[in-house]
Image (spheres, rainbow, N blue to C red):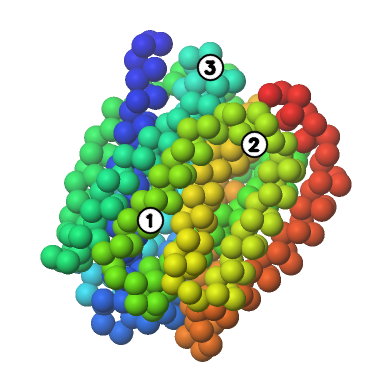
Amino acid sequence: MEKSLHSNIWKYTLFLVVNKRIFVAILGAYYLTIPNVTPEGIGIILLAGSLGGFIFEIPSGYIADKIGHKTALVMSRVFMLFSTIFFLMANNIILLIFGGVLMSVAQSFLSGTGKAFMHETLRGLKREKDYVRIMGKISSIGFAVPIIFMVLIPFLVSISFKIPFLIALIFDVIGILVAVSFVTPSVTQKETEELKLTTFKQVIHEGIRLHFFGFALFSGIISGVLFGVGGFRAPYQLFLAIPVIWYGVFFGIGRMFASLMLAYSGKIRERISLFSFYKFQIFLYTLLILILGFISTWWIVVAVFIVINSFQWGLSGVSNGYLIDIIKASKFKATLLSIQSQIKQLVAAIASFGIGFTIERLSYQYGFLYLGIIFFAILFPLYVYLNNRYAKIDAALAGGR
């Protein structure tokens, strides 16, 4: 049993590789090739997708805890397959919206569930303490391998914008097969009965007892805002007359650095406290977003997007590790982690529409400038509140390293 359970590690690595949307570097530019799609239209597409993820995020985590994490991961791949089909067929904004919504729903069935599934796998292997280190390496490979395809995608676009989606379609089929082959970690009969009898209200009470929601809010806001910024990366580069052929190269450089950081997630986690990590993120991302608001020199814009891409995903393993540590005693990890992802989706919806709305009426720079100011105005007071109220949690997490 242990040998077959151990196979989940390499299978989940492959699962993350094929999960990466290799067309993401040119997706915003692809939107603009569809008739009647403008920057504000991109904001609407991102808004719809994020709202779809927001609506399904909590139910998906709750369903995953009820029906099993493996089943939920299979469902995630099926939704992603249909998302790719809609993008491939798109000839109007409605089909793009359907594609965006289904992609968000697919990610909602993966977000908390994948982390919880691997945590249970490592617990079954008695390697629970190695979660951050192992997941960091898995995520590193999951980011590194698709870089090859992401760099090649813009070259394929010169033939047709549809080719990247055809390749993604093949990846989605592989993803379904991998999900079906996962080995389900065993749980005790008592845990199974408790999962079946527990109501969602009880799960919320458990999150409150564990002081989880403040940290989920902080992490969700950061992730949501960065998603909104990333959604306008390709359109802004197109506006600055940067050739599309370079988008995959720039995106690939960011993912390469992210992969390197993910590989060392365990060491980063050992050397930085929770609130030092939060403070670093606030000032780093505020600075980068404001640079986009003040400077429009093309190479500086490209460099800023690369740095954002690198740290956004490169530090995700550390961020997820902290959240897992806070709720590691809970049997409802997928549901609780889905709450953080739901916050992310709501913030992403607001940020995406706000940026698109501002760009359409003012400019790209004003869109990023206002976002940077609001980002800091919300996050810094929240950081001060969490730091003052939950210093003991930070100390406990540091002691558990």
Under mark 3, the amino acid is Arg
**Label annotation for residue 251:** 1
Q: Residue furthest left?
A: 159
User: What residue appears at the point 18 percent right and 55 percent down from the top-left corner?
Assistant: 166
Q: Is residue 227 left or right of residue 99?
A: right
Depth check: 1 or 188 in front? Answer: 1
Q: Secondary structure at mark 3?
A: loop
For the residues carrying marks 1 and 2, which lies nearer the camera in this image? 1
- Marks 3,2: beta carbons within 8 A: no
- The total number of labels drawn is 3
Q: Residue furthest bottom?
A: 361
Depth check: 247 or 174 in front? Answer: 247
Q: Position of residue 297 (x, y in %)?
A: 48, 74
Quarter of the figure with the N terminus: top left
- The residue singled out by tag 3 in the image is 127
Image position of 330 with respect to 123: above or below: below
Q: Of marks 3 and 2, which one's residue comes earlier in the chain?
A: 3
Under mark 2, the amino acid is Tyr
- The answer for how far apart the CA atoms under marks 3 and 2 are is 17 Å
Q: Of marks 1 and 3, which one's residue comes earlier in the chain?
A: 3
User: What residue appears at the point 45 percent right and 30 percent down from the top-left corner?
Assistant: 137
Quarter of the figure with the C terminus: top right
